[in-house]
């Protein structure tokens, strides 16, 4: 282990001598400087850049609290341990606010001071390593958010969301989560035969303390390979979810996942717009029905008026091989744009997959719908 370099700041010659004597025989510790007041403590810390400063609270010229504040500003990695007598205990909160990491009460014995130095330094070092790791993880990640939307109900949004998420997982083997934002009537857990033991509502109850470290407590890990943030269990809970919640949740999910797939309901609600504003891609679903195409036209126009970039919106035609008098060429003409992806129709496989809670993309036997989801997965990655 690296030798710890210490600075002792105390106006009492006797205290400094005692500490120095204690540390003299301690392996891996070396006193590199002394200070008899706060100002000197600052000068000495700049000169020696010690790992640890043992700092008295009450010192002339500048107090230990003021010195700590200034040292933390210039040398934030320095670990400062305050030394105080019982009657100064009221000041300790202030010293912590100034940036001290621990304190020790005088008089102390050899064991106490050595343990405090070692434990405090180790704790701070571990913390730094952990922060570095999280930062590296975050930097290595380039999260992508995909929102599955349509202004029409029942066009296959949830079917597309869950199967696209699984297809992305298969394609990339990266971390994928599906967020069920159909807050009134979320279907994702039912479609994947998952018991929503924990939902976005429980997460919101703890939103103030939500962080990258605890977000997984609110997420369901599934055998599908993708995680789920479940919708509220009952429609009456839906209104608890606000745009502010969603902003914070998205931010933290981006630190933890490579792909985040949002399954939505069919409204241009504030909640949905908050998600779509910050999403990388919108998979806009339509079927071959005239009402669905008309709604897609209106919906995409709204998105254009919101200045969403053309590349952000991908048009997905579901049940694209159904032939009821409208073909893909008609859709292109009406919507004045290209079709990005097509998903074929298969009543039997979709209904049985939903009823069994086994998404199509996890079926062993190939079927005509898989290709569509695989193409989406390749196209959005
Ligand atoms: N490619 C397909 N082939 C056949 N049937 C399909 C297909 N896609 C979806 N369906 C049918 O449409 C129904 C609705 O699908 P899904 O729940 O995915 O739509 P949704 O847009 O999420 O609906 P909601 O607006 O209620 O959330 C399904 O129950 C299924 O029966
Ligand atoms: Mg749905």
Image (cartoon, rainbow, N blue to C red):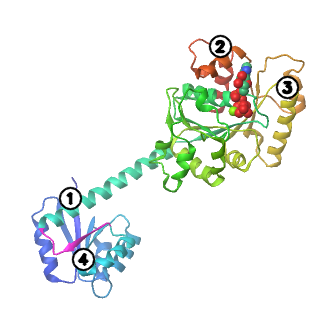
Disc 1 target residue: 3
Seen from the viewer's position, the closer of residues 203 and 169 is: 203
- Mark 3 Cα shell of 10 Å, populated few (<14), some (14-19), many (≥20): some
Which numbered marker is on residue 289? 3
Mark found first going from the N terminus, 3 or 1: 1
Regarding ligand 1, which quadrant of the image does it lie in?
A: top right
Q: x, y percentage for residue 170? A: 55, 25
Q: Nearer the viewer, mark 3 or mark 4?
A: 3
Mark found first going from the N terminus, 3 or 2: 3
Q: Is residue 42 visible?
A: no
- Mark 4 Cα shell of 10 Å, populated few (<14), some (14-19), many (≥20): many
Q: x, y percentage for residue 327? A: 86, 20
Seen from the viewer's position, the closer of residues 196 and 15 is: 196
Q: x, y percentage for residue 259? A: 58, 37
Disc 4 target residue: 84
Residue 261 lies, with reference to residue 89, above or below; the image says above
Query: In the image, which residues are magenta?
Result: 101-109
Mark found first going from the N terminus, 4 or 1: 1
Cα–Cα span, label 3 and label 1 = 74 Å
Cα–Cα span, label 4 and label 1 = 25 Å
Cα–Cα span, label 2 and label 4 = 74 Å
């Amino acid at each position: 282990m690296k030798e710890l370099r210490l600075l002792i700041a105390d106006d009492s010659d006797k205290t400094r001598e005692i500490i120095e004597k204690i540390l003299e025989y301690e392996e891996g510790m070396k006193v590199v400087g002394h200070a008899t007041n706060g100002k000197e403590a600052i000068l000495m810390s700049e000169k020696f850049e010690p790992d640890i400063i043992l700092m008295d609270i009450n010192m002339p010229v500048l107090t230990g609290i003021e010195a700590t504040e200034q040292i933390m500003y210039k040398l934030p990695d320095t670990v400062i341990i305050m030394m105080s007598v019982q009657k100064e205990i009221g000041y300790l909160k202030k010293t912590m606010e100034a940036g001290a990491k621990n304190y020790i009460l005088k008089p102390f014995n050899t064991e106490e001071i050595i343990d405090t130095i070692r434990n405090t330094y180790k704790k701070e070092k571990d913390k730094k390593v952990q922060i570095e790791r999280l930062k590296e993880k975050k930097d290595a990640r380039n999260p992508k958010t995909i929102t599955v939307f349509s202004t029409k109900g029942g066009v296959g949004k949830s079917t597309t969301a869950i199967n696209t998420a699984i297809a992305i997982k298969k394609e990339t083997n990266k971390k994928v989560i599906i967020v069920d934002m159909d807050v009134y009537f979320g279907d994702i857990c039912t479609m994947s035969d998952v018991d929503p033991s924990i939902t976005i509502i429980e997460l919101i109850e703890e939103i103030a303390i939500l962080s990258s470290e605890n977000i997984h407590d609110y997420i369901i890990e599934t055998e599908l390979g993708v995680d789920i943030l479940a919708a509220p269990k009952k429609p009456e809970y839906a209104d608890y979810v606000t745009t502010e919640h969603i902003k914070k949740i998205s931010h933290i999910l981006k630190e933890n996942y490579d792909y985040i797939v949002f399954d939505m309901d069919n409204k241009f609600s504030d909640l949905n717009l908050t998600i779509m504003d910050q999403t990388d891609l919108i998979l806009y679903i339509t079927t071959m029905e005239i009402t669905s195409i008309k709604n897609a036209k209106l919906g995409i126009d709204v998105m254009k008026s919101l200045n969403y970039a053309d590349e952000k919106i991908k048009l997905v035609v579901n049940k694209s091989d159904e032939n009821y008098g409208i073909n893909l060429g008609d859709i292109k003409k009406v919507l004045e744009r290209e079709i990005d992806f097509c998903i074929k129709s298969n009543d039997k496989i979709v209904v049985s997959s939903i009823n069994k809670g086994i998404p199509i993309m996890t079926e062993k036997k190939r079927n005509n719908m898989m290709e569509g989801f695989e193409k989406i997965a390749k196209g959005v990655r």
